[in-house]
Image (cartoon, helix red, strand yellow):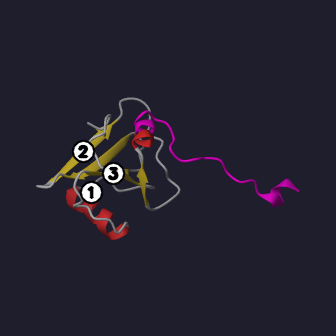
Amino acid sequence: MLNDAKGFSRIIIACGRTDLRRGIDGLAAVVQEQFQLDPTEKNVLFLFCGTKTDRIKGLIFEGDGYLLVYKRLSAGRFRWPRTQEEAMAITQEQFDLLMQGMTIVSTIRQANPKRLC
């Protein structure tokens, strides 16, 4: 299911770390309270990653209830954006890269001019 997410109208990832011990109600509360988004928006995939980057959870509202999806990789890790504590909408192409273990956020850092002297 998570390898092909073409059926979703939007894909939103929660950057940073989320406590994956949370269930449906806890993750829906994160979506609503922390990110000010509507967790009952139909066909939107909300993705969360914990401290261990080999597993993610997905939350989807299907109109008549929630679907909670858990994926743990048998090998490798997800390249999850850790720098921000906000939600980020991603494209289908970025989702495909994320599922392949590729990074979706630029990791290029600006040089510090003081350190160059």
Asked whether residue 73 appears in the rendered view, the answer is yes
Residue carrying label 2: 69
Q: Which mark is residue 31?
A: none
Residue 60 in the figure: left or right of residue 117: left
CA–CA distance in space, label 2 to label 3: 16 Å
For the stretch drawn in magenta, the main secondary structure is loop
Look at the image and give the residue range highlighted in magenta: 96-117
Of labels 3 and 1, the one closer to you: 3
Element marked by disc 1: loop
Q: Residue at x 24, y 59 (%)?
A: 41
Q: Is residue 71 above or below residue 110?
A: above
In the figure, is residue 40 to the left or right of 77? left
The percent position of residue 31, horizontal first and vertical second, equals 31, 63
Q: Nearer the viewer, residue 18 or 102?
A: 102
Q: Gap between marks 3 and 1, in whole Å? A: 22 Å
Which mark is in front, 1 or 2?
2
Question: Of callouts 1 and 2, which one flags the residue occurring earlier in the amino acid sequence?
Answer: 1
From the image, which quarter does the N terminus lie in? top left
Q: Which residue is mark 3?
A: 10
Q: Which residue is mark 1?
A: 22
User: How many numbered marks appear?
Assistant: 3
Is residue 47 among the parts visible in the rendering? no
Residue 114 is inside the magenta segment = yes
Q: Secondary structure under badge 2?
A: strand
The residue type indicated by label 2 comes to Val
Q: Residue lying furthest left in this view?
A: 64
Residue 115 inside the magenta-drawn segment:
yes
